[in-house]
Image: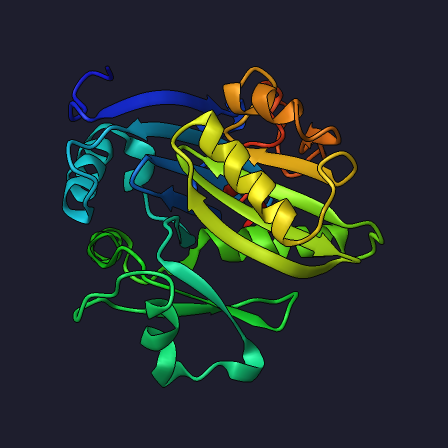
Amino acid sequence: MATGLPFMTKRFNNIFDKSLENNDLKESYLSIQISLDGFSFTVYDSRLEKYLAWSYFKLELPQKTPEKLLEALEGIYRENNLLNHAYKKVVVVHQNNLSCLVPNNYFEEEHMKTYLEHNVKVLPNDFISYDPLKNTPTRVVYIPFVNLNNFFFSKYGTFDFYHASSIVIDQLIKKYKADKETKMFVNASGAHIEILVLKEGSLTFYNSFEAATANDFLYYTLFAMEQLNLDPETIETVLLGTLTEASEAFTLAYKYIRNLSLYSEENPKLTNAFESLPKQSNFALFHLFS
């Protein structure tokens, strides 16, 4: 347990490039990803076009509520000087299952609550936002953690915020738009997974699930394949996020999904300090400025 941090917070990993020591951070961007399971942040030098720092904290909240999440966040901020600097730009990425995709042709801002109510429980005072996707004619409609946005505003003033799925979807389409083969991607973060399918570079399926066990992970992945008439023996399935080849979910899935692999593309914006970091991890955070 990290000294000084709330009992529900564990520091899991961090990486710092040596050049950070002599960097005044005036031309740097701070990016933050927050969920009920974890908190992570990066520092990106806009002049060098390189990431210089990354930290990740696993959150074990006694109750998985925005209020307890804020308590954990306040403890992390007390212990991390990098989070308390002034930055040229701050970006916050909200990761939760309070979202849905709406094609642009059907989108009307005054109906955002209705769109979400088909997928999640919406409370009367919930603030609803949306992200226009750049690489497909779709909007992601979602409920951000408003109390956390208020906290970030008190720290940094104006900042940008997005839903994590917006970054993942846009960046994968951008990377694979020329690919003629159908691919399935599964992005895992703690117990939260996102499944998306690209056919000839276009998005044909997206959904998110809570998968607390390896069996849950396998069930939702195979269920999506069945619904889309994809053959588990042949469909190329690429895993991103927290999974590794040593993960129970990977071992189990490989028994049924033969063309299974971890995302392995090099990220030119990472310095040598990040060599030990698996290429599939933190996809949204490390592709914000691509």
Foreground pick, 156 / 121: 121
The answer to whether one can see residue 131 in this image is: yes
Q: Quadrant of the N terminus?
A: top left
Look at 57% across and 83% down and name the residue there: 105
On the rendered structure, is 234 left or right of 158?
right
Residue 205 appears at what percent x and percent y? 61, 57
Write down the quadrant of residue 286 in the picture: top right
Q: Vertical placement of 75 versus 225: above or below?
A: above
Residue 71 in percent (x, y) is at 15, 39
Closest to the observer, 201 or 289 = 201
Q: Quadrant of residue 64?
A: top left
Picture quarter containing residue 122?
bottom left
Who's the residue at 26% across and 57% down the image? Answer: 149
Viewer-proximal residue, 14 or 16?
A: 14
Q: Position of residue 183 (x, y in %)?
A: 73, 46
Answer left or right for 81 relative to 180. Answer: left
Task: Give the color scheme: rainbow, by chain, secondary structure or one colour.
Answer: rainbow
- Residue at screen point 18% across, 43% down: 70
**What x and y, as percent, mark residue 48?**
61, 42
